[in-house]
Image (cartoon, rainbow, N blue to C red):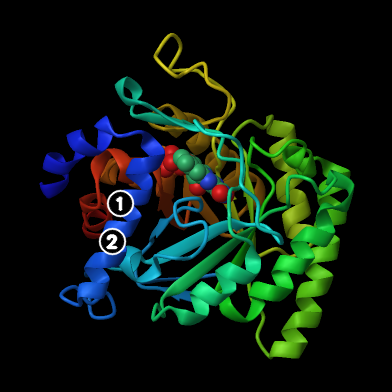
Amino acid sequence: MLYELIRPALFRLDPETAHHLTLRGLKALCRLGGWNPLRYSPKGRARSVMGLSFPNPVGLAAGLDKNGECLEGLAALGFGFIEVGTVTPRPQPGNPAPRLFRVPEAEAIVNRMGFNNKGVDYLAQEIERSRYRGVLGINIGKNRDTPVESALDDYLESLRKVYALASYVTVNISSPNTPGLRTLQTRENLAQLLAGLVAERESLARQHGRRVPLAVKIAPDLEPREIEEIADALVRFRLDAVIATNTTASRAGVEGLGHAGEAGGLSGRPLFEKSTEIVRRLSRALQGKLPIIACGGIFGVDDARRKLDAGADLVQIYTGLIYRGPALVSELVKGL
Ligand SMILES: Cc1cc2nc3c(=O)[nH]c(=O)nc-3n(C[C@H](O)[C@H](O)[C@H](O)COP(=O)(O)O)c2cc1C
């Protein structure tokens, strides 16, 4: 209700300014102390996935809190889990602005942020400082200027640095805004990447006495054969989960609308069917061997339920939060 009043003002601002203002507002609310996220826990259905206990199946998708600076504020919205990042080993500015665009007629967003983030060391500090004790996913990627052939080194560096802090780690190989990143989804590249990551994880597990689950986040722009190959590799290398999906390169559903022609990944309503179809195909290929976290165009309880019916175990939201506001989280938690 409150968000309906605030949204027109926020939508008059440039999207990136609105984004920063909202995050700052959430942080300030928590600092005021009147809203203690550690006590706030909406009734939801607890789930056990990847060997972790989720108080409810509704998570925040990666990209909103790239630097892990607002965990308490986001937790106060009622999320069952929060994914921060994408973070890269070294800080990087991302693409030049403007790089974030609303397509309100389609309840969509086009972004080409390009992994703007303050680097993995800063993220680790923020998490250590935070009082958040819920399920925390840390999403890692490669720096733009790291050649794709050396991508594994970047992922390994971040994996080591966040290992002790993460409930699970997501390997992002599906952002359309880092040149070449999506080629890591192809069969040989993926096998090489996963072999390296899994070997390092085993060594870290011995060192830390805790096996942190590894998830892989994939694109929606994949052919059925590619989905099967990815599913096969995830099982073979004993990954712990798959997140489906990231944003799409397609413009189906937004043709001719303002900003639809901007370069970048499309998220929100027009992504729903496409990403749900990926979940369905993955689910068929995986046969329950690996849990699926569904993401893409969830704007209400029916959408989330359709993702679960397609084979997902958990859901994540991002663009729905921008259009529907924070009440969407509790609506989903209560409705599922
Ligand atoms: C502005 C913006 C930035 C994003 N940044 C990231 C990111 O850094 N890493 C990532 O894995 N996904 C990122 N995403 C993708 C979302 O996590 C999500 O997969 C996608 O938007 C589909 O879900 P939605 O339709 O609910 O937004 C970003 C999305 C948006 C809109």
Q: Residue 176: x and y, percent?
A: 64, 35
Q: Residue 210: x and y, percent?
A: 65, 86
Q: Residue 272: x and y, percent?
A: 43, 33
Residue at point 34% right, 71% down?
72
Q: Which of these two is toward me, 184 or 20?
A: 20
The secondary structure type at the circle numbered 2 is helix
Q: In the image, is 61 to the left or to the right of 282?
A: left
- Quote the CA–CA distance across marks 1 and 2: 6 Å
- The residue under label 1 is 22
Q: Which mark is residue 217?
A: none
Could you say which quadrant of the image residue 207 lies in?
Answer: bottom right
- Regarding residue 311, the answer to whether it shows in the image is no
Q: How many marks?
A: 2
Residue at point 78% right, 66% down?
156
Vertical order, 232 against 249 (above or below): below
Could you say which quadrant of the image residue 248 lies in?
Answer: top right
Asked if the residue at label 1 sits under 8 Å from ligand 1, the reply is no
Q: In the image, is 45 to the left or to the right of 130?
A: left
Q: In the image, is 214 to the left or to the right of 325?
A: right
- Regarding residue 219, the answer to whether it shows in the image is yes
Residue type beneath disc 1: Thr
Could you tell me which quadrant the C terminus lies in? bottom left
Residue at point 57% right, 29% down?
264
Few, some or many residues within 10 Å of mark 2 (<14, 14–19, 20+): some
The secondary structure type at the circle numbered 1 is helix
Q: Which of these two is toward me, 282 or 99?
A: 99
Q: Which of these two is toward me, 97 or 143?
A: 97
Residue at point 53% right, 66% down?
137
Few, some or many residues within 10 Å of mark 1 (<14, 14–19, 20+): some
- The residue under label 2 is 26
Residue type beneath disc 2: Leu
Tag 1 and tag 2, C-beta contact below 8 Å: yes
